Amino acid sequence: MQDEHSVAPFSRKPPFISSCMTQSSVDYLLLKQQIHAWGKALGFQQVGICDIDLTLAEQRLSAWLQAGLHGEMDYMARHGTRRSRPHELLPGTLRVISARMDYLPEGRAEVHSQLEESSAAFISRYALGRDYHKVLRSRLQALAHRIESAAGSFGYRVFSDSAPVMEKPLAEKAGLGWIGKHTNLINRNAGSFFFLGEIYTDLPLPVDRPPANHCGSCSACLDICPTQAIVAPYQLDARRCVSYLTIELQGPIPHEFRKAMGNRIYGCDDCQLVCPWNRYAQPTEETDFQPRHGLGVADLLDLFGWDEAAFLQKTEGSAIRRIGHERWLRNIAVALGNAPSSEPLLAALQHRLGHPSAMVREHVLWAIQQHEAG
């Protein structure tokens, strides 16, 4: 992930075409309608616009941080209110253009099949293809260029999980969906398997309306979570979450969560897979989000055999690379400890007992002990 805290100020450029209108003559209602249409033409499934008042979201974030539920993710608190006050992060911001893009590469049945095969490696579906940060930022930049060609020079910055931005509350305000009990954004026509990106702008655009919450009395996401990380509706204890444990956590995975992790080696999609609204989720049409190097149907032993050079080569341009080879082996060792015993599996674990990393060796030894106990 890029440093989410280094944000350049607005930069004003000359209009892309000499016949641009001045901002005082812009029909902002028409421009809003055009932005919606241009966003879809650029591959976004939906675009919305909101103001920058995140008072309630800021209060909830503050309480979450004070409770320590963010674990080692110190960056969540590092810049204080700049995360929840867009005008402090980027002075001059009046509106946020929020966009979503589907990423699910296959149907939910195929996802379930990989998750339920204990010798297979399960990787959260968002991470199977090209790094989404690059894809979304390039499309948002293209959208900004179209706006500039119609409205003239204006102040803006594009983001996609690349700065202290409250993406989900902004997307909710912009009408893209509601924040569900699992804390992910849900759209009643598309589920939740989509990426978010934003354009902070100084244009006084008309805003969209947030939708109603449609979670009702459903508790499926709370019930399915393998580590019981959703400690209450709309409250996630990141320290228990498999996504946190396999991606954000730098050190050893706590013993209490290892069995529950099953074969999940990078992220977790359980709370999304069980959500009733994801029956409307559609496979992506973006080729960049299709699985690379067979990761969508990979075997644990095959991935455990990658040396560091193979890991770096096969995760080039992928979000997976950010965890590094050491944590990659750590995660797979836990999954192998949960897999059915076999001679090849035990031989692979024994081979990794000589790894230079004490953390890798500790997790490999744990895995071996699980099979000896069994």
Image: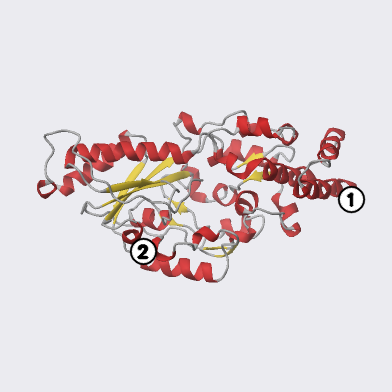
Residue 166 appears anywhere in the view: yes
- Residue 373: mark: 1
Tell me if 107 is positioned left or right of 301 in this view: left
Q: Position of residue 352 (x, y in %)?
A: 81, 39
Q: Which residue is mark 2?
A: 54
Tell me if 332 is positioned left or right of 276 in this view: right
Tell me if 197 is positioned left or right of 73 in this view: left
Rendered image coloring scheme: secondary structure
Whichever of callouts 2 and 1 sits on the residue coming sooner in the sequence is 2
Q: Position of residue 236 (x, y in %)?
A: 56, 62
Question: Could you say which quadrant of the image residue 34 lies in?
Answer: top left
- Pick whichever, 70 or 28, lies toward us: 70
Residue ID at (53%, 64%): 233
Q: Position of residue 210 (x, y in %)?
A: 33, 57
Badge 1 crowding class, 10 Å Cα cut-off, few under 14, some 14 to 19, many 20 or more, is few
Amino acid type of the residue tagged 2 in the rendering: Leu
